[in-house]
């Protein structure tokens, strides 16, 4: 049993010396490398048991040092573990829709003009991939201009008339604003109301906001 213990200590000591390269580990290997059955008191005058004890102590110190280095750095409080229900919507969708899955947009918002909009719309993956995407070009093209994007945002903020919108910096002339408003209305992102005011239809509010959200990088 003593011979097996020494052999194990020798192998462990060699591994520690190779991995760490420290003087303590190297000393431990040198001590453990004595000839089997060497007489007590040979070499530095220590017995085999004393040498084994020294090797074991050195290994314990090396293992403790390695664990200390490998220990993960605690995260800051604001960047801790994600809450268990972070992906509650995704997990709920997976439970209801088996592979190949589905896509859903959902939202519940209160607008500055006092209106509220709650909307949910979903479609299966296969249905979306089989759809004619080119038919949606007009809807996306209407949003594909910086001024028109600003216009729909300002309309959501309560600036409803062409004059109010034209008074904002960078919007252009009233005629240019009318031109952009017509394009947005034709694509369904806006509609005209009485008194020359415009609004984003309630059923388009959440799809519009999710389009903006999806465009973020």
Image: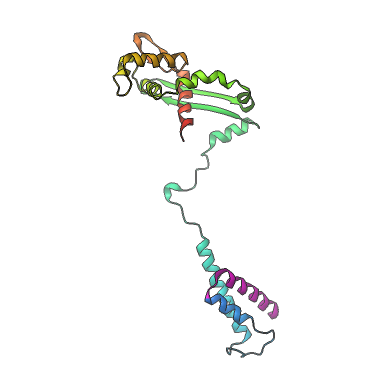
Instruction: Please state the horizontal and vertical placement of residue 112, each as a whole percent of the image.
Output: 36, 23
**Secondary structure mostly taken by the magenta-highlighted segment of the chain:** helix
Q: Quadrant of residue 8?
A: bottom right
**Residue nearer the viewer, 46 or 22:** 22
**Residue nearer the viewer, 146 or 86:** 146
Where 57 falls versus 175 (above or below)? below
**Residue nearer the viewer, 64 or 213:** 213
The residue at the point 50 percent across, 18 percent down is: 138
Where 39 falls versus 115 (above or below)? below
Where 31 falls versus 173 (above or below)? below
In this figure, what is the number of numbered marks? 0
Instruction: Please state the horizontal and vertical placement of residue 17, each as a whole percent of the image.
Output: 58, 73
Instruction: Please state the horizontal and vertical placement of residue 135, each as a whole percent of the image.
Output: 56, 18
Instruction: Please give the range of residues in magenta.
Output: 1-22
Name the residue furthest top.
Answer: 194
Instruction: Please state the horizontal and vertical placement of residue 137, each as a whole percent of the image.
Output: 52, 20
Left/right placement of residue 30 relative to residue 207 reads right
Where 33 falls versus 135 (above or below)? below
Q: Quadrant of residue 5?
A: bottom right
The residue at the point 64 percent across, 75 percent down is: 9
Quadrant the N terminus occupies: bottom right
Residue 66 belongs to magenta span:
no
Task: Give the colouring mode of the picture.
Answer: rainbow
The residue at the point 50 percent across, 44 percent down is: 82
Left/right placement of residue 27 relative to residue 196 reads right
């Amino acid at each position: 049993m003593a011979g097996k213990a020494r052999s194990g200590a020798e192998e462990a000591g060699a591994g520690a010396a190779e991995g760490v390269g420290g003087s303590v580990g190297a000393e431990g290997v040198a001590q453990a490398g004595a000839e089997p059955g060497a007489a007590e008191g040979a070499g530095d005058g220590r017995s085999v048991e004393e040498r084994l004890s020294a090797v074991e102590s050195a290994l314990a110190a090396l293992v403790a040092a390695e664990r200390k280095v490998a220990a993960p750095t605690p995260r800051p409080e604001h960047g801790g573990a994600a809450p268990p229900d972070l992906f509650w919507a995704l997990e709920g969708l997976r439970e209801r829709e088996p592979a190949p899955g589905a896509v859903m947009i959902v939202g519940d918002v209160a607008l500055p003009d006092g209106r509220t909009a709650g909307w949910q719309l979903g479609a299966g993956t296969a249905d979306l991939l089989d759809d004619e995407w080119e038919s949606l070009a007009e809807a996306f093209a209407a949003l594909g201009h910086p001024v028109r994007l600003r216009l729909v945002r300002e309309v959501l903020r309560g600036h409803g008339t062409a004059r109010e919108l034209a008074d904002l910096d960078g919007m252009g002339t009233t005629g240019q604003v009318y031109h952009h408003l017509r394009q947005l209305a034709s694509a369904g992102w806006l509609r005209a109301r009485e008194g020359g005011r415009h609004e984003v239809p309630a059923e388009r509010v959440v799809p519009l906001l999710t389009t903006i959200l999806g465009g973020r990088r």
